[in-house]
Image (cartoon, rainbow, N blue to C red):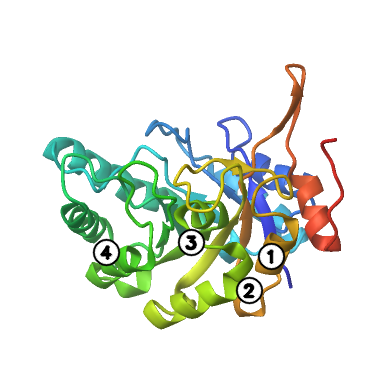
Amino acid sequence: MLILGSHVGFNNKDGLVGSVNEALSYNANTFMFYTGPAQSTLRSEIDENKIYEAYKIMADHNINNDNVIVHAPYIVNLANRSDERKFLFYVDFLKEELNRVNKLGFNKIVLHPGSAVNCTREEGLKNIIDGINMVLDNDINVTILLETMAGKGNELGINLQEIKTILDGVKYKDKIAVCLDTCHLNDSGIDINKFDEYLDEFDKIIGLNLIRCVHVNDSMNPLGSHKDRHHNIGYGTIGFDALCKVIYNKRLDGIPFILETPWVNRNSSDEYPPYKFEIENFKNKKFIDFIQ
């Protein structure tokens, strides 16, 4: 069964119920969300009543909580340890974020590995390992999914060797895995038209069993551009056919696929999410222009 959804909102008023209902409005059977602002560590209390209500809706619509993904905010950068107090703040915040994921009843959180600021790439990788080892323990049943990155600036995790270095250094092997991102792979230099070759290499170096999520995005940029700008499915340089083959790849059966494509903006007064249309196109295995 294809497990396909998108990024959805999560706000104080509706909580998890709003996230689930938004996913259902796109005819999705999974979703991804941030537990607060994506660019901030500000977090509000979680309404447990909303959790129970959301789980009832999920059960009624066959959404499995094991397929739901949480994303850590972008500003967490465990690679930068030039300011120890700031580094420890992000370690403590990420640990608390895992507690929130646990409380919500989910078990996967995607994390951008970080950017090597004021340090070498080797030092940055060590900082990430140290930070994750300070976050993970036996009491939290949440797996951190390292996201493959495009290579913008000093980003780390831009190839299999860097991802493997982090994985090898983490103490709790059962709580660390990988999230692929098709736009990031394209922009880092991986040809999605040769995706099976990439999976072969991934299996050889890391192991396909550690792929636990795939972000499905087209790209605004050419192969190897190292820019990281998502595009709507079928409108970018990767193309619908190549991405359709990714989500129907038999080697990724049972893995949640998440759309993070930008909202369509025809003009200042006509902006809408594309996810319902993109999901429908993928389900039908046929591209129909929904922007025009």
Question: Pointer 3: what residue?
Answer: 179
Q: Tell me the distance, in whole angstroms, between the alpha carbons under discs 1 and 3.
A: 15 Å
Crowding at dot 3, Cα within 10 Å, few <14 / some 14-19 / many 20+, comes out as: many
Question: Pointer 4: what residue?
Answer: 137
The three-letter code of the residue at mark 3 reads: Cys
The three-letter code of the residue at mark 1 reads: Ile
Q: Tell me the distance, in whole angstroms, between the alpha carbons under discs 1 and 4.
A: 29 Å
Q: Nearer the viewer, mark 4 or mark 3?
A: 3
- Count of numbered marks: 4
Q: Nearer the viewer, mark 1 or mark 4?
A: 1
Crowding at dot 2, Cα within 10 Å, few <14 / some 14-19 / many 20+, comes out as: few
Q: Give the mark, 1 or 3, whose residue is nearer the N terminus.
A: 1
Q: Give the mark, 2 or 3, whose residue is nearer the N terminus.
A: 3
User: Which numbered dot is residue 3?
Assistant: 1
Crowding at dot 1, Cα within 10 Å, few <14 / some 14-19 / many 20+, comes out as: some
User: Which numbered dot is residue 254?
Assistant: 2
Whether label 1 touches label 3, CB < 8 Å: no
Give the residue at x 65% y 64%: 64
